[in-house]
Amino acid sequence: MSPDILLRIGGATVDTIYMVAVAGLIGSLIGGPIGIFLATSGKGELFPAPTLNRVVGLIVNATRSTPFIILVVAIIPFTRLLTGTSIGTKAAIVPLTIATIPFVARLVEAAIREIDKGLIEAARAMGATPMQIVFKVLLAEARPALTLALTMTAVSLIGYSAMVGAVGGGGLGDLGIRYGYQRFMPDVMLVVVIVLVVLVQLVQSAGDGLARRFDKKNRKT
């Protein structure tokens, strides 16, 4: 394999990490509060707004049910509006972020709903406000599950980032398609796959380790 190809693989790896990091951060910052809202806004819950809860839930479900590759193509005008282009790493971040938001929202909702309702009632009995319950009870107790949820999000984003390469999104997926498939260079495709597998394993191992650490802290307290 030529030095030029190795440099391209290194650059594509950096692009993939950049796309995943930015999309994951923005998507989590938006999807996280949506997930908290979905978990606490049902009838009789901390912030009762059942009608709005159903509307937001429908929007989240509709976005989640859209296949990612279709989403990428469907929002090309929006991507161009934001970034000035529909190809490249910067453009790929837009559909990646939009796909991340509902994914994170549902994972955060599920993590919070797993918490024992008795803890919420006990906090209410002690005079805690709804916001205090969210930050000091729900989010604190759900740290291990939330860590695993964000880990799953990052792993999924790595796969999505490879998929967006099919439409010129940059990163490892784009490199694998242009060189490994279109130019009949199976060694490049193999290296791309190996790098993607390594990235997934690193992210998963780090997430699992953090989740175990948070779980131990929760048990001690």
Image: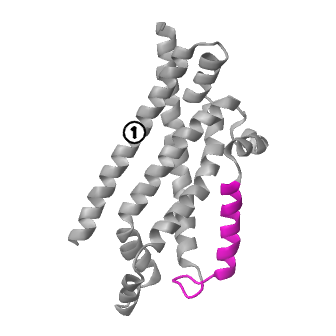
Horizontal side of residue 159 vs 137, given as left or right: right
Horizontal side of residue 62 vs 1, given as left or right: right
Q: Look at the magenta stretch and give its main secondary structure.
A: helix
Colour pattern: one colour
Q: Does residue 137 show up magenta in the picture?
A: no
User: 103 above or below 42?
Assistant: above
Image quarter for residue 161? Answer: top right
User: 196 above or below 60?
Assistant: above
Three-letter code, disc 1: Gln
At 30% across and 50% down in the image, what residue appears?
A: 209
Q: Quadrant of the C terminus?
A: bottom left
User: 37 above or below 76?
Assistant: below
Q: Residue furthest top?
A: 2
Image quarter for residue 159? Answer: top right
Q: Nearer the viewer, residue 26 or 5?
A: 5
The picture places residue 21, in percent across and down from the top left corner, at: 49, 42
Q: Nearer the viewer, residue 50 or 205?
A: 205
The picture places residue 103, in percent across and down from the top left corner, at: 57, 56
At 60% across and 86% down in the image, what residue appears?
A: 43
- Secondary element at tag 1: helix
What range is drawn magenta here? 43-65
The picture places residue 70, in percent across and down from the top left corner, at: 74, 44
Q: Residue furthest bottom?
A: 125
At 48% across and 21% down in the image, what residue appears?
A: 191
Q: Which residue is mark 1?
A: 201
